[in-house]
Image (cartoon, helix red, strand yellow):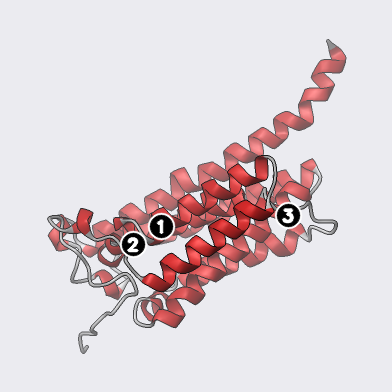
Amino acid sequence: MVDAVWTPYCGPAPDPAEALSRWNGDPVLWAVLTAATVAGLVLLRGPEKGRYAAAMAVLAIGFISPLCALSSALFTARTLHHLLLVLAAAPLLALCLPRLKRPRLAAATAVQAVVFWAWHAPGLYAQALSHDGVYWLMQFSILGSAVWFWAAVRSARGHAAVAALLAAMLLMGLLGALIVFAGQPLYAPHFASTMAWNMTPLEDQQAAGLIMWAPAAAAYLLVALWRIHGLLKPAGEAAA
């Protein structure tokens, strides 16, 4: 097999000594994030303004902070980056939107899962770390599908929302388990960059899979439990 030269958007993989100094100075990205932040803060009112500011801060952490460069080195960091989009930025942005009249919850749940799984297929993942256009397609599709999912969950009736959240939990956990038990490293862009971090490519991959399998899946479960609590609370109050 011929070794590929990976040219990820976030730059070459850093070693531990330089990682914290690798902030993304892309002027186009800074201009877009700044313009989007200002526009949102001008247009939004009330609590939505704070939620939007928090969402933009999460996006800045993902794309400007050293996490961006670190995600070129470690699949674990890339996983954390994607989970920031799906479990932090997306729900915050969804809370800034008006409630959907027709949530189409099943479709939103399926699309989010298909998009997330697809971009973690080794071939597509490698393409995203080779071409900036594919990289941004990955980011926008993951974020956009997750915003749709959370907006649909917010707008749906309680039982349906709980079912969707549990389905998302199972699908996230299953993907994590498959990555953990793959038995061989799958993500070629990180084959040569993990050793500087005292990890083999397989160990890096397994750590990322565990993050998806446990804490990421548990995040959906916690929201599901919160929705269940909302369903039970009126009955409990009536009994009292």
Residue 55 higher or lower than 193, as above or below: above
Residue 233: image location, x then y, percent: 77, 24
- Residue 84 % position (x, y): 46, 53
Which residue: 28% across, 74% down? 189
Q: Locate residue 109, reporting x and y percent.
A: 67, 59
The amino acid type of the residue labelled 3 equals Ala
For the N terminus, give its image quadrant. bottom left
Name the N-terminal-most of marks 1 and 3.
Answer: 1
Marks 1 and 2 close (CB-CB < 8 Å): yes
Q: Secondary structure at mark 2?
A: helix
Q: Residue 39 or 143: which is nearer the viewer?
A: 39
Left or right position of 57 against 180: right
Is residue 165 among what the camera can see?
yes
Please, what secondary structure does the residue beneath circle 1 have?
A: helix
Q: Of the two numbered discs 1 and 2 on the same chain, state the one appearing first in sequence.
A: 1
Where residue 151 sits, quadrant-wise, is bottom right
Q: Residue at x 25, y 64 (%)?
A: 73
Who is closer to the viewer here, 40 or 147?
Answer: 40
Q: Nearer the viewer, residue 182 or 91?
A: 91
Q: Nearer the viewer, residue 233 or 48?
A: 48
The furthest residue to the bottom: 2
Residue behind mark 2: 68
Question: Which residue position is annotated with label 1?
Answer: 62
Residue 235, position in %: x, y?
Answer: 84, 22
Alpha-carbon span between mark 1 and mark 3: 24 Å
The residue under label 3 is 152
Q: Give the Cα distance between marks 1 and 2.
A: 6 Å
Indicate the amino acid at tag 2. Answer: Cys
Question: Which residue is rendered at x = 23% and y = 72% of the image?
Answer: 12
In the image, residue 173 above or below residue 104: above
